[in-house]
Amino acid sequence: DRRLIRNLLNKYNDIILTPADKNLGLVVLNVGDYNALIYNHLNDQRTYTKVTLNLSALMIKYKEIVALIQANLNPNKMEFKTLSNLKLESFKLPKFYILPKLHKHFDLSDISNLPTRPIVGAPHWFTTPISIFLDSLLQPIIKKFDHILKNSHSLIEKLNAIQLDPNLNNILVSFDVE
């Protein structure tokens, strides 16, 4: 299957294959259309702000944060070793990409209106080790809160456990935040 897809992409270099949102399959898009959808996101000034990137200043700030963690949290975890040994050359800029939302209504005749979910994958960015370290500190605290759900299955379990008064008109409301 992978060889077939690779051959297809080599033969038609004007298309891109990307996963759909909600694991609804693979989507084939024209590269120009895909790039236009990405620029639609990035040019949305209500959501994004253009910044200049000074990597040296970022690394200085990062080292200050590591020193603050070391001074105040006294970590003896493996994550701290990763934090301390980070070199400027060892990280890569996060990758911005989109997942088409096939489950949302859109006009098939105008691909520019295809709803998409923006994703920024940052496994090699300099903030990742600090995020992993802080997550390891926060997880035990977060698990103590009853109102925080781990996933959609835990929501279903909680909803199934609710005893509603059949004499009342109960309404369940959900919102999709944009």
Image: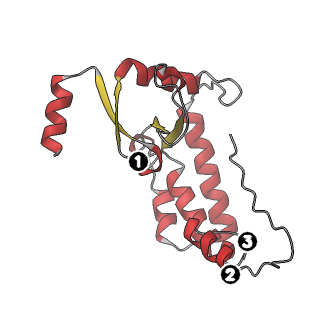
In the visual, does 171 lie left or right of 38? right
Residue 112 percent across, percent down from the top left: 51, 21
Say which label, 1 or 2, has the lower sequence index: 1
In the visual, does 102 lie left or right of 2? right
Q: Are marks 1 and 3 in contact (CB under 8 Å)?
A: no
- Which residue is found at the position 82% from the left and 79% from the top? 165
Q: How many angstroms separate mark 1 from mark 3 (CA)?
A: 29 Å
Say which label, 1 or 3, has the lower sequence index: 1
Of 80 and 153, nearer the camera is 153
Residue 57 percent across, percent down from the top left: 60, 35
Of 84 and 22, nearer the camera is 22
Q: Quadrant of residue 92?
A: top left
Question: Residue under circle 3?
Answer: 147
Question: Residue under circle 2?
Answer: 161
Question: Residue under circle 1?
Answer: 24
**Could you tell me the amino acid type at mark 2?**
Ala
SS under mark 2: helix
Q: Is residue 32 placed above or below 66 in the rendered structure?
A: above
Residue at the right extreme? 168
Q: Residues within 10 Å of mark 3 (few under 14, many from 20)?
A: few
> Which mark is nearer the camera, 1 or 3?
1
Q: How many angstroms separate mark 1 from mark 2 (CA)?
A: 30 Å
Q: Mark yes or no: residue 151 visible.
A: no
SS under mark 1: loop
Q: How many angstroms separate mark 2 from mark 3 (CA)?
A: 14 Å
Q: Quadrant of residue 130?
A: bottom right
**Could you tell me the amino acid type at mark 3?**
His
Residue 89 percent across, percent down from the top left: 40, 40
Q: Is residue 146 placed above or below 59 in the rendered structure?
A: below
Q: Is residue 46 placed above or below 151 in the rendered structure?
A: above
Q: Residues within 10 Å of mark 2 (few under 14, many from 20)?
A: few
